[in-house]
Image (cartoon, grey):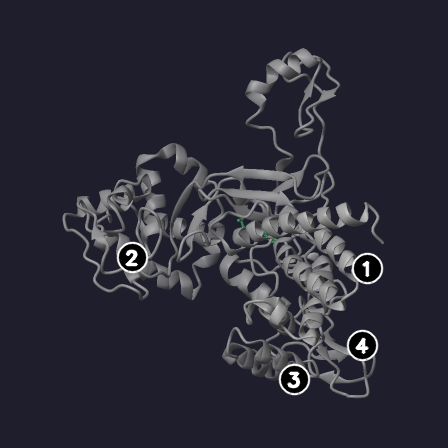
Amino acid sequence: MYEEAKKCEVCQKQASHKCGGCHNVYYCCKEHQRSGWKSHKNQCRPYKVCTDDILGRHLVATKDIKPGDLVLQEPPLIWGPAQVTVPVCLGCGTAVDENSRPCSKCGWPMCSEICEKAPSHIPECRYTVMRGDKVSIRNFGMIHPSYQSITVLRMLYQKQFLPEVWKKIDLLESHCEKMKNTQKYQQERIMISQFIQRFFKLKNVFTEEEIMKACGIVMVNSHEVPLTNPPHISIYERASMLEHSCSANCSKSFTDAGGLMVRAGSRIQKGEHLSICYTDPLWGTPSRRHHLQESKLFWCACARCVDPTEFQTYFSALRCQDSSCEGNLLPKSFIDNTTNEKGPDWFCDRCPSVLSSYSVQDILERIGKDLAEMPKGSVRECRSFVRTYSELLHKNHYYLTDVKIALSELIGQEDDCIAEVCDEEVELKARVCRELIDLMERLIPGEKRVKGLILFELHAAIMEVGKRKGDPESFYAALMSSREILSEAIEILKYEPDGLPEGKIYKQAVTNLHDLEAILRTVHKTMGDNPL
Ligand SMILES: C[S@@+](CC[C@H](N)C(=O)[O-])C[C@H]1O[C@@H](n2cnc3c(N)ncnc32)[C@H](O)[C@@H]1O
């Protein structure tokens, strides 16, 4: 348990005033709190770093944290192109084409002179100049193997020339030993390590061991940053210590400049571990766990993974195959069977029906294939998918949830204007949004972004339903309800950067709220403050 050091940070005398920011340090008087702030402000954080055998380093809250509070914000230690990418400008990260200009020193295609001079481009530029031959990229718009090594090379550059930055990178988990027997390790040994040693002629500078450690650090710690097209990857110092949970209590967002902000998504009590979700929280349990094992080398055993019902949401459940039964099929556990190749049987929670893992796989693969092949952007197709598979899947199943999220956005968008949509579909939009919000609150209460987007869709549906009822009471009730829903969406989405779709929805939500309040003012002016 965390021990409070009750000595004044300034004079070491007995102290009773706690720092209100982090609750980690004490002062004997206000005067010392003021004078100590200059040196404390960089350490003033609502968490401490702890270590254990399973998690390694992780962060634990040192005080109660409210939803929305900033837990940490930091610029990247390093950024670079994703391992699998089309040719991108190495100054700004966006895709380049035939019209790009080669860097005058090294030949890597850049989008402008400004990008050529970007500090991020120095490592590969310098190593390319040192190798003696310029690079010539001719194939654009398709995955290019020469970019696979760039981010790793940028890390190694820190090791050679910027030891202060490298010291921070070197502390990060690489899982090098665990990786050694994997196919991925052998591929990266050839595609990245040998490429760096041969193409950049750095065999005498970096050993294979050093390069593979840098590869491991990139794999375990990098965050995909969707601010560029295609997304790039960044590595952050403190955020790298956040552990994973499939129902995390913190969520991350990016600043326009590529910095990372981590905020509390739900109420966090002092002593609780801080977590983010490393994978897609809207995948089913087996997919999330396999992805985490492949990319981060651990089998997740978070509260959500150990509960097959996923907090009674039945997010991965099938409906019982017996049409007279209302039950749901799930395995007894998704966790204990990791090493059992055959996989567990799935049992109905209401009747004795059992389905083999093989049959379950077969059903899920078939539906997954249908979903992948379904034409995108069509309300009709989404509705047909939901109708067909509601027979087989629990209403909250991840496949149905995926399609319902699309449906909640498409109704109104497909016709360009919600006023053009028939009554039945507007009501469906409102119903689907409410179901989804309820699901998100139970499944991923800390991850508010999806909820924020659905709230935005819900406000439009409620407003439209209210308008169509044709009586002033319903219209007024819809106005009030929409205002509340929009305000909540704005509160959630306000940290999203302008460049992302979520940031654009935020702006639209602010405009809509402004319009809605103007209507409410007119209503109040003509009918008084209590019009009903
Ligand atoms: C980004 S790092 C987190 C910091 C790391 N623990 C350290 O000491 O630097 C990711 C690694 O932490 C460990 N980890 C994170 N969350 C975990 C969890 N929920 N269960 C088990 N291991 C976890 C795994 O080893 C994972 O590969």
Give the residue pinned by disc 4: 349
The N terminus is located in which quarter? top right
Amino acid type, residue under disc 2 in the picture = Val
Q: Which mark is residue 473?
A: 1
Residue receiving disc 3? 388
Q: What's the residue at 64%, 57% (across, down)?
A: 456
CA neighbours of label 4 inside 10 A, class few (<14), some (14 to 19), many (20+): some
> Between disc 2 and disc 1, whose residue precedes?
2
Q: Nearer the viewer, mark 2 or mark 4?
A: 2
- The residue labelled by disc 2 is 96
First reached walking from the N terminus: tag 3 or tag 4:
4
Identify which amino acid the numbered label 3 is placed on. Answer: Thr
Res 191 seen here: yes
Q: In front of the other: label 1 or label 3?
A: 1
Q: Compared with residue 30, is residue 141 higher up or lower down, i.e. above or below?
A: below
Can you give x and y, in whole percent of width and height, for residue 133 in the image?
A: 14, 51
Q: Position of residue 427 (x, y in %)?
A: 71, 71
Question: What is the CA distance from the residue labelled 4 to the residue labelled 1?
Answer: 45 Å
**In this view of the protein, can residue 243 be seen by the observer?**
no
Q: Measure how far apart labels 1 and 3 are at the Cα level.
A: 38 Å
Q: Residue furthest bottom?
A: 323
Q: State which quarter of the image contains the C terminus.
A: bottom right
- Callout 3 secondary element: helix
